[in-house]
Amino acid sequence: MKILVVGNGGREHAMARKLAQSPGATVFITTGNAGTDEVATPIPIKPTDVDAIVRFAAAERFDLVAVGPEIPLAAGLADRLVEAGVTVFGPVAAAARLEASKAFSHEIMDAAGVPSARTHTFTDLDAALDHLSTCPVPVVVKADGLAAGKGVVVAMTRDQALDAARSFMADRTMGDAGDMLVIEEFLQGEEASFMCLTDGRTIRPLASARDHKRIFDGDRGPNTGGMGAYSPTPLVGPDNSPELVEKVMRPVIDELARRGIEYRGVLYAGLMMTADGPKVLEFNCRFGDPETQPVLTRFRGDLAATMIATATGRLEEAVFDFDSRVAVCVVAAAPGYPGKVSTGQAISGLRDAASIPDVFIYHAGTSKGPDSMPVVSGGRVLAVTALADDFAAARELAYRAMDRIDFAGIQFRRDIAASVSTHRENTGKP
Ligand code: AMP
Ligand code: GLY
């Protein structure tokens, strides 16, 4: 069975590793990184080059294309693969719009009655500034389109809110993504990442997770793509995930179906658990990064068969569950991240760190240097993930591994899963 993973980050390394464990699977990855070689053959086609991926997957008769990132999905990669007769894990562009346009996702949530923040949408800067001059603060200013997790400003003051609106719309810091602004009521509570597989009919929750979006310990500093994650979160488990499926996932999937759009793949809801109940912060049309690293590390089952079942409308038949141990994932980032990063530094200690039992090192922004040794090539560099019976033990393992790894200017948070590990009751199953 030939499987092509599209993407080159830590999420895709975790996908490729688990897919390679499926019986009879041979995994290829476009383009991969310095770590994916151990499980997948690299293919030199950019993950955003939709035409080339479709040509290659069809000509080489792949049995499954599993898409990691949102950009090719929003650009219609799944539509094109379906047309070419290739089985694809990932939604069509019309469904991926749930992530690609925050205004569209609010439109769907409103129509479907899914709880979310109150929202105002603007295509005119002056109108947005007028609104921000009088609305309550804190307030959240979002670029409508795709911005790699960097198009959201939680403004604590009115000036911050006005600056954010100007930078997105007038200075175009997020490019076209900022042509429309979504201004949201500020929600308070604890966050959770809730991912479900769906074939448009059946909906199957995955183990829950929590990510840490801010760059510095104590949730300080700017938002990033994610500096670490753990699974499960005690906020989402067997007690409430059936209700979340019915109140959040099913209404959205049904509302899309009413509009003639079938959602197949993984649907990710970023939730805020507020005093008034769970509310949706965002939908993503793909696996979260870095949540996928701890979640798929815990996945038990045949991932290739599960993805094919999802893609072909047979998700009901898929058999999988999750390791009862918990997982903690700590991201090592390049100096400068989430701003402009410096790259090219040699990475040491990887083998030593990976030799610790129950530690999995997923590569993200790495490539092979002149002597084939891994060097830093992107913002988020590694996702060091550990499995253990409780969060304290998983943290100890992950940080023991991280302390063996080094590159010039390495930055990572010391407090991933720290607050959860102090609660014994938080070590339960998903
Ligand atoms: P998003 O990419 O939309 O999930 O936003 C990124 C992060 O910004 C979220 O994980 C939250 O921490 C924060 N955020 C987004 N929307 C809101 C909101 N309405 N209220 C409070 N915080 C928010
Ligand atoms: N970790 C959040 C995301 O993947 O968007």
Image: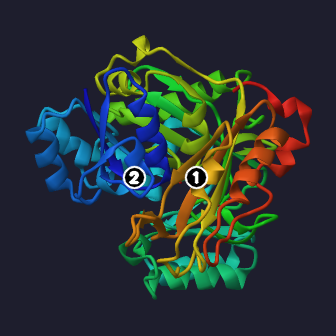
Q: Residue furthest left?
A: 59
The residue depicted at 62 percent of the width and 83 percent of the height is 162
Q: Is residue 36 left or right of residue 274?
A: left
- Dot 1 amino acid type: Arg
Label for residue 69?
2
Q: Is residue 48 left or right of residue 385?
A: left
Mark 2 or 1 closer to N-term? Answer: 2
From the top left corner, tell me how far across and down residue 229 is, in percent.
Answer: 67, 49
Name above or below for residue 385 compared with residue 363: above
The residue depicted at 81 percent of the width and 31 percent of the height is 427
Name above or below for residue 30 compared with residue 163: above
From the top left corner, tell me how far across and down residue 424 is, in percent.
Answer: 90, 33
Q: Residue furthest front?
A: 371
- Dot 2 amino acid type: Pro
Screen quadrant of the C terminus: top right
Screen quadrant of the N terminus: top left
> In which quadrant of the rendered view does residue 103 lie?
bottom left
Q: Label 2 to label 1, Cα distance in Å?
A: 28 Å
Secondary structure of the residue carrying tag 2 is loop
Residues 397 and 60: in front is 397
Write down the residue under mark 1.
351
Q: Is residue 53 visible?
A: yes
Secondary structure of the residue carrying tag 1 is helix
